[in-house]
Image (cartoon, rainbow, N blue to C red):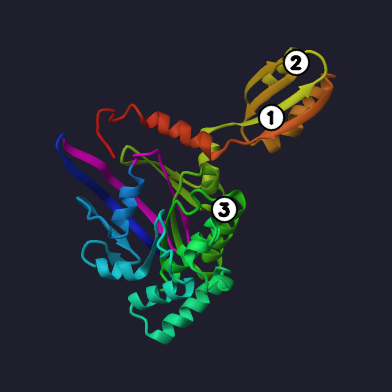
Amino acid sequence: MTMIQARGLAKTFTTKQGPVHAVAGVDFDVAAGEIVGFLGPNGAGKTTTMRMLTTLLKPSDGTAHIAGCDLLREARKVRTNIGYVSQAGGAKPTSAVRDDITLQGRLYGMGKSEARARTNAVLEQLEIADLADRKAITLSGGQRRRVDMALGLVHRPQVLFLDEPTANLDPHSRGVVWNHIRRLRDEHGTTVFISTHYLDEADSLCDRVLIIDRGRIIAEDSPERLKASIAHDTIQIDVTGTPDGAAQVLSHCPGVHEVTADALTLSVKCRQADQMLTTLLRELDTAQIPVETVRVLKPTLDDVFMTITDRSRPRDADRAHV
């Protein structure tokens, strides 16, 4: 089942300098139960797209359906089926956590008893029940972020939109939030759409990523497939003696893309390094070249991001964007 479907979704702002195309007709689908990362440079159109999908900004063109509801004609139904956690968060600093979440449930039309029950359930779900009577202003960044998520989940949304969910959090707090996002998918079947600048976050969490640049989707796939399609693995081999002869031996191996030598280290670029490693070591042993250490370096989503966005820059270079 498709939970988010966008077709030609676009937003144009009118300025003194003329029209500014923030988003220029994006197309994508998000399936039920997926965690999808939305990546892009500053000004690429991430925030504008997310604000359109959450009914906070009316599109200039195109269509979208969220949880089976038409974004333009059924905006109220869309809001009923989604949760939205902005980067700024929604917790009221001077309110007790329990009261704030209960009020959110009431705003979604729940009766008092239902709202209290849902508040207790979501506090337990996010492991913050012990914070229920504290004011948000007294919480740590990671605790407050989980309260923000509770506000977005109290009405049992089918789709949760998270805008920079771990911005400014320490590594431990980020890991805690990641675990809770995974549990939303695995235990509750929630579809999660995440905008983030942390590429390691997208790599660790997301089933798929969408990369937007200059208002257009320029790539989409799983992190693993994107990395495999863009960059090679690198095997670094430290050998005894000069590495030039070893470089000659390995450069002729099938599957090796490139071999470079620096001091006593060989750098071998290839696909599927884990499978190639045995072959390379066997070739060096046959050539009687002693090996001291071996390291396998995998490409990161940062490599993919830089490569793809660099490629997209020449296109529509004169088009303004926000």
CB contact under 8 Å: marks 3 and 2: no
Q: Which residue is mark 1?
A: 235
The residues bearing labels 2 and 1 have C-alpha atoms spaced at a distance of 14 Å
N-terminal of the pair, mark 1 or mark 3, is 3
Q: Which mark is residue 93?
A: none
Q: Position of residue 10 (x, y in %)?
A: 24, 47
User: Could you tell me which secondary element the residue under label 1 belongs to?
Assistant: strand
- Can see residue 298? yes
Extreme residue toward the bottom, this view = 113
Q: Which mark is residue 174?
A: 3
- Image quadrant in which you'd find residue 313: top left
Amino acid residing under circle 2: Pro
User: Could you tell me which secondary element the residue under label 2 belongs to?
Assistant: loop
Comparing labels 1 and 3, the label whose residue is closer to the camera: 3
Q: Which residue is mark 2?
A: 243
CB contact under 8 Å: marks 2 and 1: no
Mark 3 crowdedness (10 Å alpha carbons): few <14, some 14-19, many ≥20: some
Amino acid residing under circle 1: Ile
Q: Position of residue 218 (x, y in %)?
A: 38, 39
Look at the image and tell me in which quarter the C terminus lies.
Answer: top left
N-terminal of the pair, mark 3 or mark 2, is 3
Amino acid residing under circle 3: Arg
201 to the left or right of 3: right
- Can see residue 190? no
Q: What kind of secondary structure does the magenta stretch mostly adopt?
A: strand
Q: Position of residue 192 (x, y in %)?
A: 45, 59
275 to the left or right of 134: right
Q: Which residues are magenta?
A: 18-44
Q: Residue at x 69, y 17 (%)?
A: 261
Residue 205 highlighted magenta (yes or no): no
Q: Position of residue 266 (x, y in %)?
A: 71, 21
The residues bearing labels 3 and 2 have C-alpha atoms spaced at a distance of 42 Å
